[in-house]
Amino acid sequence: MTERRRLAVVVWAVLVSQVFLYPGLEGLVGALGGGNSILARTWFLVAEFGAFVTVAVVWGLASDALGRRTPLVVAGALGGAASYLGVAFAPRLGVGFDGVLALRVLGGAFTIGAFSLSITKLMDLSGGHGRNMGAAGAAIGFGAALGSTTGGLLSTIDPLAPLYAGAVVLGEAALLAATVPDRTPEGGIELAPLLDRLRGRPALLVPYAFGFIDRLTAGFFALTGVAYFTDAFDVGPAVAGVTLALFFLPFAALQYHMGQFSDRVGRFVPVVVGSLLYGVTIIAVGLAPVFVLAAALMVVVGVCGAAVAPATMALVTDLVPASERGAAMGGFNVFGSLGMLSGFLVGGVVTDRYGFLAAFLTAGGLEIAIALVASRSVYRMADGQLWATEEG
């Protein structure tokens, strides 16, 4: 198996372990003592992603400074596996829901290291930035697709079963990650000059902003989307998981090719046009009057998302030299994790106060807004003007 494929499998494994929990989240949170409200589910997810936000850049900076990423990926995956087991055993040990949330924070701090640095190791490979980020995007999509379907089935057996499965998958990811050699610049670099250089690259805020909104929609579907399908159309967790997979399968299957496409034609069309279509189709799901139409629209949402994700990550790679990729991708994942966290909060709070339609209008509207606001900047990047500015 090539290095690219092994790294993609590690990224895939991290996503599988996370998404295992989403379809049966209501039963899982109830079994852990959190009750059955959508806000309890929101905090369960927010705890993990809050840690993602806090430490993602720390992992990237550490890997750039050390000039090594593989040991950190292994440590992150093993720590995440241990945290999943800790949460699963919490009820037997008499740990309350507050303790569970603390374990989720600890697990998130480890898991983001495995996730972010695996993607960074893909950035270190040759072969085209779009192609490498397409591999990462495909791994994310297939991981989410398998996680949603399998997690829904596991939750019908035992609400805690997705946690045990997640721990196993992360443990296996650690073993596989240990076989991938480092391709980082030799010797590492000093942290202070690195931070100065990243602060001097304001153009990174453009892909970071797209990453924030794109992950917001992912967080929105993980929490509010599942609640929408189960509550509005009265389907069980297994069917809700399959419905999520209708988004994630085309999202995964098309990303590698969409990444290559962005290498050939530039980033503007997949990022800006793709984001506009993505936002429109998200709103359309919330307007669907029947389950069959809503499920069919999830496929269209997946296709649009596949156009956006790899090109957005490739923009990060385009804008920094190899020696700064760990911190740059760490920053991207901070914004992405903030987006996921915001997606949980926006979806949960807006749905709780105003209903599902208002939540879908908010999520889709934000995706449309970022495409319109940032379109000129992306066009300049695609036209080659900003690279010269950044490197000059």
Image (spheres, grey):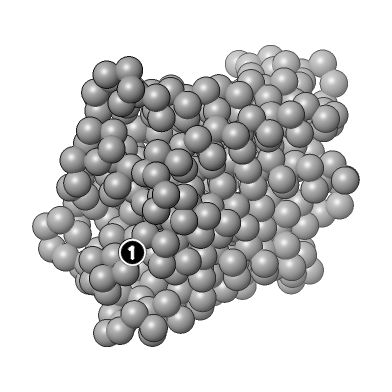
In the image, taking residue 138 as reference, residue 103 lies left or right, namely: left
Task: Say few, some or many: other residues with alpha carbon within 10 Å of mark 1 (under 14 / 14 to 19 / 20 or more).
Answer: some
Residue at screen point 25% across, 28% down: 97
146 in relation to 204, above or below? below
Residue 214 visible (yes or no): no
Residue furthest to the front in view is 157
Where residue 71 appears, x then y in whole percent? 72, 20
In depth, the one of 111 and 366 nearer the eye is 111
**Horizontal and vertical percent position of residue 157:** 42, 49
Q: List x then y, in percent, for residue 17.
A: 54, 42
Residue occupying image coordinates x 76% and y 51%: 132
Which residue does the numbered mark 1 point to in the structure image?
236
Which quadrant would residue 167 be assigned to in this image? top right
Please state the horizontal and vertical placement of residue 340, each as a whole percent of the image.
41, 47
Q: Is residue 42 above or below residue 277?
A: above
* Residue located at (60% from left, 16% from top): 192
Question: Does 370 appear above or below 41?
Answer: below
Q: Amino acid at mark 1?
A: Gly
Quadrant where the C terminus sits is top right
Q: How many marks?
A: 1
Asked whether, in this view, residue 38 is left or right of residue 370, the answer is: left
The residue at the far left in this view is: 353
For the point 67% across and 67% down, the residue is 253
Above or below, comparing residue 86 to residue 369 in the picture: above
Q: Secondary structure at mark 1?
A: loop
Left or right: residue 122 compared with residue 239: right
The answer to whether residue 36 of the structure is visible from this angle is yes
Q: Quadrant of residue 94?
A: top left
Q: Quadrant of residue 365?
A: bottom left
